[in-house]
């Protein structure tokens, strides 16, 4: 296993449900906030707003992208609303921290990077709770890619322009299979961080389908890092 990561210099991590497991239900809070925003903005009852949100997510990659494409909303207003969440339920992750440290301790000139469809502010909020913020050199969020989300090709173009790394010496960790398609095409090593719990039926589709672009799968990120660094 270590052999397959020998050439890696850049360790790129998605944030939500990748650096912490879905059982902390952080994304559930964001989900509720997104529905609330749509209810208010489009003057819809809760069930219709929720359906609309799922449609946006499925059609445009993110709810934000759907709202921008179909309703021309102000992305900052939306992001401030949805990322207003309580992260106190997330405990510090000493195990993950230990493994992340090994990336630069055991390997010269290696880097850790966050690439999220959320905001940089949200990323720091979550990483502060996990107590790993100081370990990341670069955080790329949705604003940095001009609000174009993963899995779009254009989003990865912006990402690689900004971070200026060679995809062929990089690895991408993600919880959503679809977000690993572009990384694989560009020559990154792809790792799917799978939830150990059962998926909510409304988001199950995102985890199904062809997985041939995924090289490695793990249910425990820290444990996986221990094996490959
Ligand atoms: Mg994620």
Image: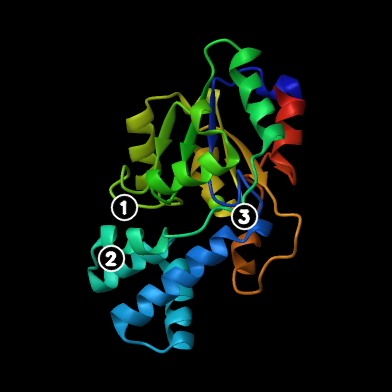
Residue 201 vs residue 47, the one in the foreground: 47
Q: Is residue 220 above or below residue 98?
A: below
Secondary-structure class at tag 2: helix
| Measured Cα–Cα span from mark 3 to mark 1 | 28 Å
From what the image shows, is residue 166 above or below residue 206?
Answer: above
Instruction: Provide the secondary structure element on which disc 3 rests.
Output: loop
Q: Is there CB contact under 8 Å for labels 1 and 2?
A: yes
Badge 1: how crowded within 10 Å, few (<14), some, or many (20+)? some
Real-space Cα distance between discs 2 and 3? 31 Å
Q: How many marks?
A: 3
Q: Earlier in the sequence, mark 1 or mark 2?
A: 2
Check the picture and name the quadrant holding the N terminus: top right
Q: How crowded is mark 2: few (under 14 residues within 10 Å), some or many (20 or more)?
A: some
Marks 2, 3: nearer the viewer: 3
- The numbered mark, 3 or 1, whose residue comes first in the sequence reads 3
* Within-10-Å neighbours for mark 3: few <14, some 14–19, many 20+: few
Residue identifier under label 2: 68
Q: Is residue 31 above or below residue 177?
A: below
Q: Are marks 3 and 1 in contact (CB under 8 Å)?
A: no
Residue at which label 1 appears: 147
Residue at 31%, 47% (x, y): give it.
143
**Spatial CA span between label 1 and label 2:** 9 Å
Identify the residue at image location x=31%, y=52%: 147
Secondary element under disc 1, as helix, strand or loop, is loop
When asked about the image quadrant of residue 160, the answer is top left
Q: Where is residue 128 in the image (x, y as percent from the top left)?
A: 51, 40
Q: Is residue 183 above or below residue 4?
A: below
Question: Which residue does the numbered mark 3 point to in the structure image?
Answer: 89
């Amino acid at each position: 296993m270590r052999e397959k990561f020998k050439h890696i210099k850049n360790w790129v991590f998605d944030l939500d449900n990748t650096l912490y497991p879905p059982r902390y239900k952080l994304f559930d809070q964001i989900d509720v906030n997104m529905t609330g925003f749509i209810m208010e903005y489009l003057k819809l009852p809760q069930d219709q707003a929720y359906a609309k949100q799922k449609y946006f997510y499925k059609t445009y990659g993110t709810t934000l992208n759907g709202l921008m494409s179909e309703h021309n909303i102000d992305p900052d207003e939306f992001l401030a609303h949805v990322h207003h969440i309580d992260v106190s339920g997330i405990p510090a992750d000493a195990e993950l921290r230990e493994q992340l440290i090994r990336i630069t301790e055991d390997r010269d000139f290696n880097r850790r990077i966050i690439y999220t469809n959320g905001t940089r502010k949200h990323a720091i909020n979550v990483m502060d709770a996990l107590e790993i913020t100081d370990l990341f050199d670069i955080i790329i969020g949705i604003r940095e890619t001009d609000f174009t989300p993963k899995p779009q090709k254009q989003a990865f173009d912006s990402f690689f322009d900004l971070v200026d790394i060679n995809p062929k010496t990089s690895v991408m960790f993600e919880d959503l299979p679809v977000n690993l398609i572009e990384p694989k095409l560009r020559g990154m090593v792809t790792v799917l961080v799978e939830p150990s719990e059962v998926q909510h039926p409304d988001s199950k589709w995102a985890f199904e389908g062809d997985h041939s672009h995924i090289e490695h799968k793990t249910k425990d990120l820290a444990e996986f890092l221990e094996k490959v660094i």
